[in-house]
Amino acid sequence: MNPGEAHKVETDLDQVVTQYRPVVSFKVRKSLGGGNPDWEDVVNEIMMQAIQKIQSGEFRGESSVGTFIYTITTRRIIDYIRQKTRVLRHAPEVSPLPDPHDQVERDERAARLAEAIKQLKPKFKDVLYLYYFKDLSREEVAHKLGITPAKVSERVNYAQKLLRKILTG
């Protein structure tokens, strides 16, 4: 290729970019959304890919340059959407914000439960504290209180019945 032909290719490529960049930009913005910050990068990638393919001879002239660029544009848009979809599929799902009313209700229930527990005899308070708040097994609670595991179960069950009665009454 002589120097004159090289200049002709560059001029033609400049003309291709000038002619097709606005069309590609419109197609990409329409497909990805104008608010998508990546749309300009995608357009640049498409134009670079088209220029490289024309320069390397991959564009053989079997179709118009416009059809060739349109095909590259469509494929790149599809690839971009697939990539983003794949990323989103693996992204953790955003948990909804807690309802402030739920927190208020939980706080109120906890306060009522605390007041109800204060009304219990010490033997019931102790068994509930060790079993639920210290998360000890029946055997461990029995050992600490010097009673049998069966007695621990009996006191826990009876304490629960008393609390239900206090809270509903």
Image (cartoon, grey):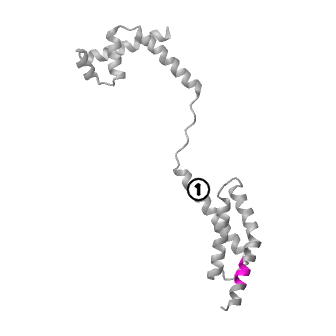
Percent of width and height locating residue 126: 32, 14
**Magenta part mainly helix, strand or loop?**
helix
Residue 6 position within the rendered picture, expressed as x and y whole percent measured from the top left: 68, 86
Residue 105 image-quadrant placement:
top right
Determine whether 22 is above or below 93 in the image.
below
Question: Up-down: is 77 above or below 110?
Answer: below
Residue 9 among those drawn in magenta: yes
Q: What element carries label 1?
A: helix
- State the residue in front, 8 or 126: 8
Which of 22 and 7 lies nearest the eye of the viewer? 7
Report if residue 104 lies within the magenta region: no
Q: Which residue lies furthest to the front in this view?
A: 3
Residue 29, located in which quarter of the rendered image?
A: bottom right
Q: Which residue lies furthest to the bottom in this view?
A: 2
Q: How crowded is mark 1: few (under 14 residues within 10 Å), some or many (20 or more)?
A: few
Q: In this view, does 143 lie to the left or right of 60?
A: left
Compared to 134, does 59 lie above or below? below
The N terminus, quarter of image: bottom right
> Residue 156 lies in what quarter of the image?
top left
Identify which residue, 6 or 80, lies in the foreground.
6
Where is residue 162 shown, x and y percent of the image? 41, 10
Which residue is disc 1 drawn over? 84
- Does 129 sit above or below residue 61? above
Q: What's the residue at 59%, 24% (across, down)?
A: 101
Expressed as whole percent of the image width and height from the top left, the position of residue 133 reads 36, 22
Residue type at mark 1: give it: Lys
For the record, the magenta segment spans 8-13
Give the side of residue 126 with respect to residue 54, left or right: left
Q: Residue sitting at 56 percent across and 31 percent down?
A: 98
Which residue appears at 35% of the width and 17% of the height?
A: 128
Q: Is residue 43 left or right of residue 87?
A: right
Q: In percent of the image, x 48 and y 14: which residue is there?
A: 112
